[in-house]
Amino acid sequence: MESVKALNNPYTGVIANFANWLLAGERPIVYEDGQQTRDFIYVDDVAEAVVIAALMSTYHDTYNICTSEPTTIEGMARTLAKTLGWPLYCDIEPNITGEERPGDIRHCIGNNSRFALEFDWAPRSVPEGLKLYAPWLHEQAERTRATVS
């Protein structure tokens, strides 16, 4: 599980990076061909799963908390741009560099089937999670603008 990070932290994940670029009116930078896949999950789904496991489990085990759904990096950039409402304001086409970065992995998808079955749990879809995340992103952008000006 990736740790939770602030938008202005240089070590944030790809969604926060895309959000920073989009909210600044810039095209998100996508390395390689954009077809790398990741298993993105909404933070509240992770929190809910942890609480469920803590309250309902009488034993300790290891589970994957994820969506089990691959999302391409390019697809994430496009979906986030549409969710944030930027098609009216900027070119949402991601800047696909074709540049490979050392250490990047091509695909990373988890399997949540055991946790979902044992605890009757299901995560939100990526678009649903982004719709819930978008207001917070806009709020953070407003705070940053207020601090800078």
Image (cartoon, rainbow, N blue to C red):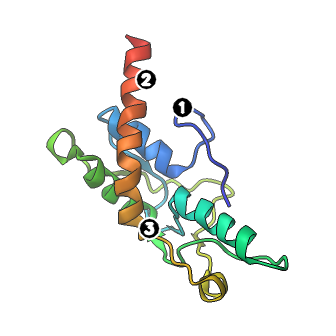
Whole-percent x, y for residue 2 in the image: 66, 56
* Label 2 element class: helix
The structure residue drawn at horizontal position 41% and vertical position 24%, both measured from the top left corner, is 143
Q: Quadrant of residue 119?
A: bottom right
**Front-lying residue, 119 or 144:** 119
| Residue position for label 1 | 8
**Front-lying residue, 20 or 91:** 20
The answer to whether 87 is drawn above or below residue 76 in the figure is above
Whole-percent x, y for residue 44 in the image: 53, 58
CA gap between label 3 and label 1 equals 24 Å
CA gap between label 2 and label 3 equals 29 Å
Marks 2 and 1 close (CB-CB < 8 Å): yes
Q: Residue 72 has which mark?
A: 3
Q: Quadrant of residue 132?
A: bottom left
Q: Amino acid at mark 1?
A: Asn
Q: Residue 144 has which mark?
A: 2
The structure residue drawn at horizontal position 63% and vertical position 40%, both measured from the top left corner, is 11
Whole-percent x, y for residue 59 in the image: 85, 79
Left or right side of 54 for 93: left
Left or right side of 95 for 101: right
